[in-house]
Amino acid sequence: MKVLIVGSGGREHALAWKIAQSPRVDKIYCAPGNAGIANYAECVDIKAMEFDKLAAFAKDKAIDLTVVGMDDPLVGGIVDVFETQGLRVFGPRKNAAILEGSKAFSKDLMKKYNIPTAAYENFDDPQEALHYLETEANFPIVLKADGLALGKGVLICNTLEEAKAGVRTIMEDKQFGSAGNRMVIEQFMTGREVSVLTFVDGKTIKSMTSAQDHKRAGDGDTGLNTGGMGTFSPSPFYTKEVEEFCEQKIFQPTVDAMAKEDREFKGIIFFGLMLTENGPKVLEYNARFGDPETQVVLPRMKTDIVDVFEACIDGTLDQIDLEFEDNAAVCVVLASEGYPVKYEKGYEIRGLEKFKETDGYYVFHAGSALRDGKIVTNGGRVLGVTAKGQDLKAARENAYKAVEWVDFDNKYFRHDIGKAIDEA
Ligand code: GLY
């Protein structure tokens, strides 16, 4: 098979690595890819939102399967464009990717189908949102821009003044662009966060092993929100009992609800969950693999991922035996100092070769480029260093050991990824 991957981050690097394990695959392309993905795939200079160019490329190269990693093209309808042209593609159509593309839609869906989530109101008008905050809200409270905002459109506000400023930021100043045309105001939930990625074929849903992300930039969950500074898998808080609840009350009901709404979902549903004292609730849905969750989940997956992608497309996921190793993995993201605000790029990355020689250790490139024969930093998040271990403690020790193998100027990382494991 020839496979095309759409995307350019650490998630797509992990996908390329996993797809390359499949004996069915002869050739992988990635558009646009990065310097690490180039170890497994031929990188193609087409951007993820250039649907017609991507489809023309897929036809020209007789691509058998396209896998879309990123949210923007999915929400923008890349799957519909490929399908219209007779191309086989893994991911939800536009009318299903709305599960991630509109937070107001997803909250209404959960309310309609009794899927546990925080209480909320949707607003199209900033004056009505301000009035609601002044008359009905309890603090802290959560403001969410409706659309995609690079993971930055969620504001946790501790006071009325902060919340009023947040409404202006989202709906009037349009800091997140048209994503802020609508807004969700949601009750603040406390508890443990868990990410569960699932494969879905329109009717059947199969969960991958659980993970937990660390979204804040600094140690001890301080600083600004980022795309994710590190992950561990599995989450010790996602017990068998919690899993059973989620499968019965959240996962299957979501798939069934989408089908009932004539929005059949095929692809990945990534459930962002909060384990509250009143039980698990949905924080958010994503319609794609998580980043950097993928970097700890896929190294533990035993099943051929190409078989699973095909089963999702064909509606035969019930025949797949999805298996994961009985171990653990930790990913520590190496970022450029100053991320997520202002940082420099173009520094040489040294020490990558050691990962090629060491089983159970992986370096997934998030923002790297090849310049004059050298691999250099090319983004805020630069690398995800993943290590496996027999348990979470061992995986964490291994990951932090491997973090020292790589070096570049302005290297920055959190020192407490997976620290929560100690409290389990
Ligand atoms: N790690 C969070 C996300 O992928 O959205």
Image: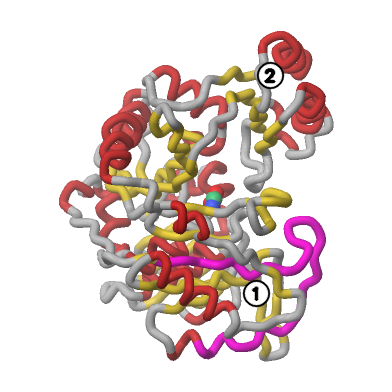
Mark 2 packing: few (<14 Cα in 10 Å), some, or many (20+)? some
Could you say which is closer to the camera, residue 228 or residue 265?
228
From where the camera sits, is residue 304 visible? no
Q: On the image, which quarter does residue 278 sit in?
A: top left
Q: How is the image coloured?
A: secondary structure
Mark 1 packing: few (<14 Cα in 10 Å), some, or many (20+)? many
Residue lying furthest front: 423
Residue 136, given in percent of the width and then of the height, sits at: 67, 11
Q: Residue visible at 66% across and 83% down?
A: 407
Q: Is residue 213 above or below residue 261?
A: below
Q: Is residue 385 left or right of residue 236?
A: right
Q: Residue visible at 64% across and 32% down?
A: 144
Residue lying furthest top: 135
Q: Would you say residue 341 sits in the magenta stretch? A: yes
Q: Is residue 353 above or below residue 160?
A: below
Q: Is residue 116 above or below residue 298?
A: above
Q: Is residue 279 left or right of residue 418?
A: left
Q: Residue visible at 43% across and 45% down?
A: 270
Q: Which residue is mark 1?
A: 368
Could you say which is closer to the camera, residue 348 or residue 238?
238
Residue 142, given in percent of the width and then of the height, sits at: 64, 29
Give the magenta part as a residue range. 329-354
Q: Which mark is residue 124?
A: 2
Residue 417, given in percent of the width and then of the height, sits at: 55, 62
Q: Amino acid at mark 1?
A: Ser
From where the camera sits, is residue 21 visible? yes
Q: Amino acid at mark 2?
A: Asp
